[in-house]
Image (spheres, rainbow, N blue to C red):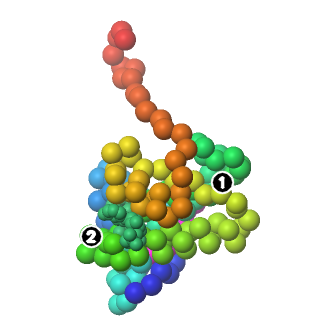
Amino acid sequence: MSVRRMRDGDVETVRDLLRRLWSDSGDYDFAGETVFVWDRGDGVVGGFVSVSIRPWAEGCASEPVAYIEGWFVDEDLRRRGAGAELLEAAENWARERGFTEIGSDAEFDNDISVIAHLQLGYRRTTRLQFFKKDLTREGP
Ligand SMILES: CC(C)(COP(=O)(O)OP(=O)(O)OC[C@H]1O[C@@H](n2cnc3c(N)ncnc32)[C@H](O)[C@@H]1OP(=O)(O)O)[C@@H](O)C(=O)NCCC(=O)NCCS
């Protein structure tokens, strides 16, 4: 089992994993992102991380900055270091391109992701609350 770059034939599997993280991600287009996968050893993907270059990111000082867009490991593979190796691959990818920081995020109540980030060397930066307003309705 090891980390490798995503191949064309992996895309549907990675999309399936992504839909388990974000149910509305549909046929997600990974254009502009570099994706590393966790190969179970038989070519079958059991996890992935995707990294992009963002013009800026909350809490990061450098611009542009590398950013973790998605990170998922299949339930049966968790707590065996796959997640850590995937993140390391993304970090190395960024480091090799001269980036000195990498940003990431997790939903406020995703305790496991928060713990894993902290354990793997990430530190908390800004906390944000998102809002939206329906502009098709009158009034506040
Ligand atoms: C977050 C996730 C990718 C971690 O993958 P993983 O393969 O289990 O991670 P690792 O085994 O490399 O764990 C790295 C460290 O994180 C911490 N950690 C991971 N899962 C943990 C858990 N359930 N409870 C406590 N600590 C945990 C541990 O410190 C662990 O190191 P250790 O096992 O040596 O103690 C995985 O839990 C996952 O896919 N979760 C659902 C999707 C998700 O929330 N993704 C992140 C979106 S921001």
Mark 1 residue type: Val
Mark 2 residue type: Glu
Q: Is residue 104 highlighted in magenta?
A: no
Q: Position of residue 118 (x, y in %)?
A: 47, 57
Residue at the image point whose x is 29% and y is 53% from the top: 23
Q: Is residue 31 visible?
A: no
Residue farthest along the front direction in this orientation: 119
Q: Position of residue 45 (x, y in %)?
A: 36, 78
Reading the image, the residue beneath label 2 is 75
Reading the image, the residue beneath label 1 is 65
Q: Considering only vertical position in the picture, is 46 above or below 1? A: above
19 left or right of 33 in image: left
65 left or right of 80 in image: right
Q: Is residue 36 highlighted in magenta?
A: yes
- Mark 1 crowd level (few <14, some 14–19, many ≥20, 10 Å Cα): many
CA distance for labels 2 and 1: 30 Å
Q: Position of residue 50 (x, y in %)?
A: 50, 64
98 left or right of 4 in image: right
Residue at the image point whose x is 51% and y is 78% from the top: 5
Front residue (pair 118, 55): 118
Residue farthest along the left direction in this orientation: 76
Magenta residues, start to end: 32-37
State yes or no: discs 2 and 1 in contact (Cβ < 8 Å): no
